[in-house]
Image (cartoon, rainbow, N blue to C red):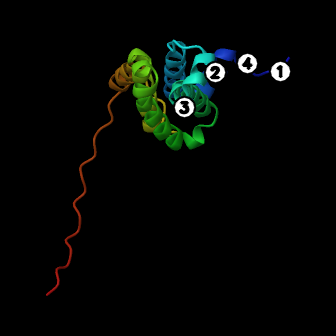
């Protein structure tokens, strides 16, 4: 047995999730899946209708693919999110008003979350930890404050 403590799968998943726009990609994929599930026509009917019917299936499938790409390839998140918001808005016309507006809303919100995600941002400290740190800082003995030093006068040009 090694001397270091074993980390669980929860902490590994948490680190993986923090390194990418997880919620944006998940909402985007769920929005595409919801739109895809609300399609009422079978694939045989869609093939007889033509391109308009095919677009009703193509756009939600692309939304699901973009959601998965955001999760597994976050380096290209800006391109994926802009493409996804355009496809989400396109489902309003092609796919039962964007999956009865729910899938459209999930797709747009997921795209916006992905677009606004910053990879190098420090994790936010919880309110409980901030309060605890403030209490500990207040309980520590205060050090005497030093007097501000006066700066030497600067020579003005004549």
Q: Badge 1, how many Cα within 10 Å: few under 14, some, many 20+?
A: few
Q: Nearer the viewer, mark 4 or mark 3?
A: 3
Residue located at (38% from left, 18% from top)? 101
Q: Nearer the viewer, mark 2 or mark 3?
A: 3
Q: Badge 4, how many Cα within 10 Å: few under 14, some, many 20+?
A: few
Which label's residue is closer to the chain start, 2 or 4?
Answer: 4
Question: Would residue 102 be found to the left or right of residue 13 on screen?
Answer: left
Is residue 83 visible to the viewer in this orientation of the structure?
A: yes
- Expressed as whole percent of the image width and height from the top left, the position of residue 61 reads 58, 26
Q: CA distance from mark 2 to mark 3?
A: 41 Å
Farthest residue in the bottom direction? 158
| Residue identified by numbered label 1 | 2
Question: Would residue 37 be found to the left or right of residue 2 on screen?
Answer: left
| Residue identified by numbered label 2 | 13
- Expressed as whole percent of the image width and height from the top left, the position of residue 108 reads 41, 28
Q: CA distance from mark 4 to mark 3?
A: 57 Å
Q: CA distance from mark 2 to mark 4?
A: 17 Å
Residue located at (23% from left, 64% from top)? 151
Question: Would residue 46 be found to the left or right of residue 156 on screen?
Answer: right
Q: Which mark is residue 5?
A: 4
| Residue identified by numbered label 3 | 51
Q: Nearer the viewer, residue 12 or 73?
A: 73
Q: CA distance from mark 1 to mark 2?
A: 22 Å
């Amino acid at each position: 047995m090694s001397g270091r403590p074993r980390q669980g799968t929860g902490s590994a998943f948490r680190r993986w999730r923090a390194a990418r726009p997880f919620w944006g990609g998940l909402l985007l994929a769920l929005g595409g899946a919801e739109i895809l599930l609300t399609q009422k026509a079978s694939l045989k009917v869609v093939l007889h209708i033509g391109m308009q019917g095919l677009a009703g299936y193509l756009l939600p499938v692309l939304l699901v693919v973009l959601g998965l790409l955001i999760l597994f390839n976050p380096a290209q998140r800006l391109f994926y999110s802009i493409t996804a918001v355009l496809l989400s808005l396109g489902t309003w016309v092609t796919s039962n008003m964007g999956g009865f507006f729910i899938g459209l809303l999930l797709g747009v919100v997921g795209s916006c979350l992905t677009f606004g995600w910053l990879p190098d941002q420090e994790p936010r400290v919880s309110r409980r930890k901030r309060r605890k740190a403030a209490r500990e800082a207040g309980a520590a003995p205060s050090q005497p404050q030093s007097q501000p030093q006066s700066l030497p006068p600067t020579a003005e040009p004549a």
